Image (tube, coloured by chain):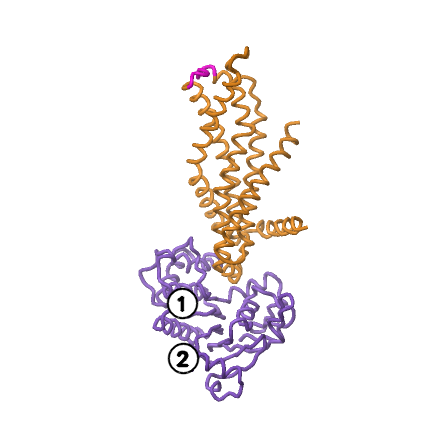
Chain colours: A purple, B orange
């Protein structure tokens, strides 16, 4: 579980996150939704340690990330997998080398063990016979799947997905959704998904946090969204044609 | 004021770069790859430029000797000293500042704007060190070798152009090369080569690493890497000449 408490972040005069608190549960697909510029990406960057908030706490299963020293933070980060909006695969490495990268950096596996793990992760995301391809030579959906394979290579406890469906056709989007959902349940990962895709939310969402102008505007299960009296949330839903 | 801020950021970047690598085996492989890439992509252009610089300097010195009472073999001596002391290290560094510098800055800059650097940070890897340390070491190993290579080829180019143009025979040129040879000049040239190689690789990596934005900013970082590397090379050329030759 990840608990975010009273997090504040400002950029110059702009107060992007205002006393933000939320809980993200283990084995669940936790969604962060909201309009562009509302603070979703800043929240996610604070959670993974790319941005340091001015105040508040971010606790990964009793480990307060902001209070940890450098080495302790690295240990937490080894438990984090992240799927980026633009996949962020390493251009200079092949598909299998991308997946093998965290294994080479953080494990004492032999080359044979690394190869086995890479093949397992790639087959888990239904990618076969693409091991030697460069990321530039595969499709957007395949890149996302390689990104997921890389993210789960070290058996992470926490999986962050930033706009996992952006730029994908509807069919591939659903495949990626199913994959993330399956992996979350199978490995009991705390998965946090930052998205605008309401169809994804209704297919796989367990816990939903609606962020509006840096505040947590609404939190609950997806079934409660339609019956919510929250005007901003309803307007967001209507704009998404759901 | 902005210069001081940038310089401070550069020093902090170097502090982040020069830390113990996560995995020495991977680091060694990275150094070999970077050294190979720098050397393999540059030896052709360095051969061309240094050979022609040696050739042109022989012809120009021969032109100034025309009608003088000075012995011809001194052409070889002057070509040797001017190439070893200045042309080989400085021109090679300026060329590599453009070629290697822009390549390093654009590679790291692209990694930055495509979130590859963020991916490294989230994994718990020191991204500055992982992306730049091996490039700096690879450059410091390879660029001085290219400077030595440029020295030799410039003298070969000088001898050939002297012979082809009839300015001086090969024997006369070689006699000039062997007259009054001072080994310290090579030490001076190699000191410059090591300094310049560090300037090129570290400044370019820094420019790439501080890229924010998109393709346009990657281009800007690449241009800045070349400009600041060249300024650094010229500045330290002057400082080292003053410190080591007088």
A135 over A156 or under it: above or below: above
Picture coordinates of residue A104 (x, y %)? 45, 56
Q: Which label sits in the foreground, 2 or 1?
A: 1
Give the residue at the far left of this rendering.
Answer: A129
The local secondary structure at tag 2 comes to helix
Picture coordinates of residue B145 (x, y %)? 49, 35
Q: Residue at x 55, y 47 (%)?
A: B224
Horizontally, is B97 left or right of A200 in the view?
right
- Pick whichever, B177 or A190, lies toward us: B177
Q: Choose top left, top right, bottom left or bottom right for residue A91.
A: bottom left
Density class for disc 1 (Cα within 10 Å; few <14, some 14-19, many ≥20) is: few
Dot 2 or dot 1, earlier in sequence? 1
Residue that carries the numbered disc 1 in the rendered image: A167
A209 over B97 or under it: above or below: below
Picture coordinates of residue B46 (x, y %)? 45, 34
- Quadrant in the picture for the C terminus of chain B: top right
What label does residue B9 carry, if any?
Answer: none
- Magenta segment boundaries in residue numbering: B165-172
Give the residue at the far top of this rendering.
Answer: B69
A140 over A228 or under it: above or below: above
What label does residue A203 carry, if any?
Answer: 2
Give the residue at the far right of this rendering.
Answer: B1
A13 in magenta: no
- Pick whichever, B239 or A118, lies toward us: B239
B171 in magenta: yes
């Amino acid at each position: 579980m990840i608990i975010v408490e009273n997090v504040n972040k400002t950029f110059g005069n702009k107060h992007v996150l205002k006393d933000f608190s939320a809980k993200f549960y283990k084995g669940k697909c936790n969604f962060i939704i909201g309009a562009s510029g509302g603070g979703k990406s800043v929240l996610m960057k604070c959670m993974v340690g790319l941005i340091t908030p001015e105040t508040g706490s971010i606790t990964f299963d009793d480990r307060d990330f902001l209070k940890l020293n450098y080495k302790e933070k690295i240990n937490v980060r080894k438990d984090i997998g992240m799927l980026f909006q633009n996949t962020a695969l390493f251009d200079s490495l092949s598909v299998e080398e991308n997946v093998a990268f965290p294994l080479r950096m953080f494990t004492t596996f032999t080359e044979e063990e690394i190869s086995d793990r890479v093949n397992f992760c790639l087959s888990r995301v239904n990618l076969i016979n693409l091991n030697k391809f460069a990321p530039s030579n595969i499709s957007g959906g395949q890149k996302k799947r390689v990104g997921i394979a890389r993210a789960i290579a070290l058996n992470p406890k926490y999986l962050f997905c930033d706009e996992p469906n952006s730029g994908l056709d509807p069919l591939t989007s659903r495949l990626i959704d199913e994959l993330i959902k399956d992996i979350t349940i199978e490995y009991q990962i705390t998965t946090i998904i930052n998205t605008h895709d309401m169809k994804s939310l209704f297919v796989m969402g367990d816990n939903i946090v609606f962020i509006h102008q840096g505040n947590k505007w609404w939190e609950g299960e997806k079934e409660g969204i339609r019956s919510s009296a929250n005007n901003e949330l309803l307007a967001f839903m209507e704009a998404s044609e759901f | 004021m902005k210069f001081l801020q940038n310089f401070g950021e550069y020093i902090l970047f170097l502090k982040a770069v020069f830390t113990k690598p996560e995995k020495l085996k991977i680091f060694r492989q990275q150094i070999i790859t970077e050294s190979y890439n720098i050397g393999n992509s540059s030896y052709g252009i360095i051969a061309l430029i240094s050979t022609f610089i040696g050739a042109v300097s022989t012809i120009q010195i021969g032109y100034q000797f025309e009608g003088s009472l000075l012995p011809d073999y001194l052409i070889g001596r002057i070509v040797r000293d001017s190439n070893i002391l200045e042309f080989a290290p400085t021109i090679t560094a300026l060329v590599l500042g453009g070629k290697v510098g822009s390549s390093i800055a654009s590679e790291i800059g692209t990694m930055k704007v495509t979130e590859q650097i963020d991916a490294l940070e989230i994994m718990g890897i020191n991204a500055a060190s992982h992306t730049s340390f091996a490039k700096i070491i690879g450059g410091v190993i390879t660029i001085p070798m290219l400077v030595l290579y440029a020295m030799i080829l410039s003298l070969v180019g000088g001898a050939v152009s002297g012979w082809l143009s009839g300015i001086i025979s090969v024997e006369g040129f070689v006699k000039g090369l062997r007259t009054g040879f001072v080994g310290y000049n090579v030490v001076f040239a190699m000191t410059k080569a090591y300094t310049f190689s560090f300037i090129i690789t570290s400044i370019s990596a820094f420019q790439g690493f501080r890229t924010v934005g998109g393709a346009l900013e990657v281009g800007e970082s690449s241009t800045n890497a070349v400009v600041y590397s060249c300024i650094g090379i010229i500045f330290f050329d002057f400082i080292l000449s003053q410190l080591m030759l007088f």
